[in-house]
Image (cartoon, rainbow, N blue to C red):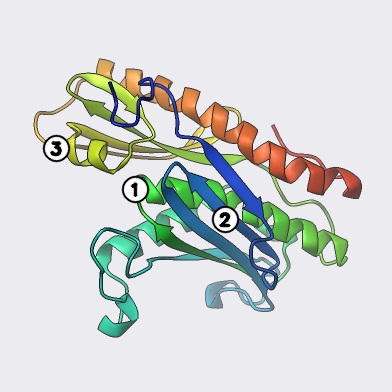
Amino acid sequence: MRPDGRQPGEIRPVRLEPDFVRYPEGSVLYRAGETVVLCNVSVLDRTAGFLRGTGEGWITAEYAMLPRATEERSEREVSRGRPSGRSQEIQRLIGRALRAAVDRSLLGERTLQVDCDVLQADGSTRTAAISGAWVALVLALARMWEQGLLPEWPLIRRIAAVSVGLVGGEVRVDLEYTEDLDCDVDLNLVFTGTGGLVEVQGTAEGEPFSAEELQAMLGAGWGGAGELFEAQRAVVVPRLEPLGLSLPD
């Protein structure tokens, strides 16, 4: 039995609250059980330096955990002068995942700046940040479409991320904190809506895992991602349909 009573392949209840912050072009408060992440997307009138003059846009991300997102207060990273290695690794992951969702040649020389702030952490914060940020990204693109800033609809993929673990020989989806501590294998998966993989991050905490165990975890992860895609769809489709826009496969 899992600590919160879920079945092995069951994800935590997901709630998405769009437009949580009024100022960004896209904003979502994403809840997965007790993990809560605020995802904002801002449209900036400049692209990355290496893309200047190309007409192509950029998508980048920042990730941070609030000082009391966990049981004990952590120091703000800004007070240390730079993000931690963990935060840098996660924000690069978020950026890579979201860049796979968009045809950046249609953005113009603009940057979509993604900010993911963990308000409360109970495991799987990076995957929650990606799944929530994709929704905020779609809302930002819809705002750009309304404002006539896009020549064509640039969204080319749905993106959702899910954690999977091997705990005592059992494959479990969407790990909460105590499971993450005890797992023998920790796997983070970024899926497209058609079952493709944008990224696979996997680590054995002790004994190596087998190819058969990896296949079992990939299959369980895809099952969990399907539920996330439906939760995302319920939020973004009502925003897109009045504009004559649709989601990709």
Q: Is residue 149 visible?
A: yes
Q: Earlier in the sequence, mark 2 or mark 3?
A: 2
As measured in the structure, the alpha-carbon distance from the residue carrying label 3 to the one carrying label 1 is 19 Å
Please, which residue is most extreme toward the top here?
212
Q: Give x and y (percent) for residue 205.
A: 14, 37
In the image shown, does 178 or 199 lie closer to the viewer?
Answer: 178
Report the number of discs: 3
Question: Mark 3 sits on what residue?
Answer: 205
As measured in the structure, the alpha-carbon distance from the residue carrying label 2 to the one carrying label 3 is 31 Å
Q: Give x and y (percent) for residue 38.
A: 52, 60
Disc 3 residue type (three-letter): Glu
Q: Give x and y (percent) for residue 201.
A: 32, 41
In the image, is 231 to the left or to the right of 33? right
Task: Tell me the quarter of the picture where residue 180 sits.
Answer: top left
Identify the element where label 3 is drawn: loop
Identify the element where label 2 is drawn: strand
Residue at horizontal 45 percent and vertical 34 percent from the top: 12
In the image, is 100 to the left or to the right of 144? left
Q: Tag on residue 29? A: 2
Identify the element where label 1 is drawn: loop
